[in-house]
Image (cartoon, rainbow, N blue to C red):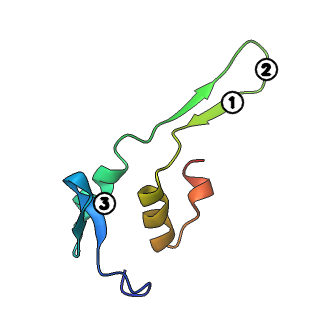
Amino acid sequence: MARKDLDALPLYPEGRPCSRPTTARVIEVFELVQRHWLVVGDNEPQCLVTELTTLQAQIIKLLGLSPADYGR
């Protein structure tokens, strides 16, 4: 957060700002993200992924990762 000059992230209920997020709080944001593989007959498997929220994508970017690798 310091590298991006962010004072806080809206991690608390109702989107209240959190200036010192714990690992547990950050992981909680991703609690509802799911990934499923759907196989129908002989067709290629399809990967179905929960669409990331703006906050989830922001956190992934802050971690130096690509949101495309973790959702759509």
Quick one: 35 or 54, which is closer to the camera?
54
Q: Secondary structure at mark 1?
A: strand
| Image position of 21 (left or right of 44) | left
- Residue 38 location in percent, x, y? 63, 23
Secondary structure at badge 3 equals helix
**Viewer-nearest residue: 55 or 33:** 55
Give me the residue at 24% from left, 68% from top: 17
**How busy is the neighbourhood of tag 2: few (under 14 within 10 Å), some, or many (20 plus)?**
few
Q: Please, what is the three-letter code of the amino acid marked with disc 2?
A: Asn
Q: Residue at x 23, y 75 (%)?
A: 19
Q: Is residue 16 left or right of residue 31?
A: left
- Can you tell which quarter of the image residue 44 is in? top right
Q: Position of residue 66 (x, y in %)?
A: 59, 64
Is 59 positioned to the left or the right of 72 in the image? Answer: left
Q: Residue at x 34, y 44 (%)?
A: 31
Residue type indicated by callout 3: Val
Report the residue marked by disc 3.
Answer: 26
Q: Residue 43, which numbered label?
A: 2
The location of residue 33, given as percent across then percent down, is 43, 42
Q: Residue at x 64, y 34 (%)?
A: 47
Relative depth, front residue between 7 and 59: 7
Q: Earlier in the sequence, mark 2 or mark 3?
A: 3
Residue 23 percent coordinates (x, y) = 26, 64
Residue farthest to the top, as pictured: 41
Q: Give the numbered dot on residue 46.
A: 1
Relative vertical location of residue 8 with respect to residue 41 in this rendering, above or below: below
